[in-house]
Image: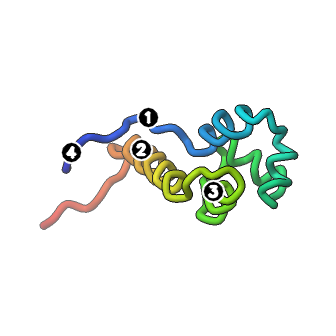
Amino acid sequence: MMTGIRMKNPVHPGSFVKTEIVEALELTVTRAAAKLGVTRPALSALLNERAAMSPEMAIRLDKAFGVSMETLMRMQNSWDIAQARKRWDEIEIATAA
């Protein structure tokens, strides 16, 4: 396995959006969802880490609040990689003959 510097517990992008945008700007989830043009349940799922950051949601957040789409997508990628690494030992593969 290749190793390098990596974050073992990166922040879920939804958690970042919740604290750094929604709470920081004192928005309700309903108001933030309306500003983004998404449903309240869709935004709530992201903020509560039940949904992944989609590229479209990242664009909406970039346009509405100036948070770089690329940064948000890198956060999602780091989160996904960390979750997969937690399952490293559970993933079995066939050995080469």
| Circle 3/circle 2 CB separation < 8 Å | no
Secondary structure found at label 3 = helix
Identify the residue at image location x=82%, y=54%. Answer: 35
- Asked whether 89 or 44 is in front, the reply is 44
Please report whichever mark, 4 or 2, sits nearer to the chain's N-terminal start. 4
* Amino acid identity at mark 1: Asn
* Amino acid identity at mark 4: Thr
Q: Position of residue 21 (x, y in %)?
A: 68, 40
- Asked whether 92 or 38 is in front, the reply is 38
Secondary structure found at label 4 = loop
Identify the residue at image location x=66%, y=46%. Answer: 50
| Circle 3/circle 1 CB separation < 8 Å | no
Dot 1, how many residues are within 10 Å of its Cα: few (below 14), some (14-19), or many (20+)?
few
Please report whichever mark, 1 or 2, sits nearer to the chain's N-terminal start. 1
Dot 4, how many residues are within 10 Å of its Cα: few (below 14), some (14-19), or many (20+)?
few
| Circle 1/circle 2 CB separation < 8 Å | yes
Locate residue 2 relative to residue 12 in the image: left or right.
left
Q: CA distance from mark 4 to mark 2?
A: 13 Å
Q: Which residue position is annotated with label 1?
A: 9
Q: Which residue position is annotated with label 4?
A: 3
Q: CA distance from mark 1 to mark 4?
A: 16 Å
Q: Which residue position is annotated with label 3?
A: 62
Q: Which residue position is annotated with label 2?
A: 82
Q: What is the quadrant of residue 22 in the picture?
A: top right
Front: mark 3 or 2: 3
Dot 2, how many residues are within 10 Å of its Cα: few (below 14), some (14-19), or many (20+)?
some
Count of picture labels:
4
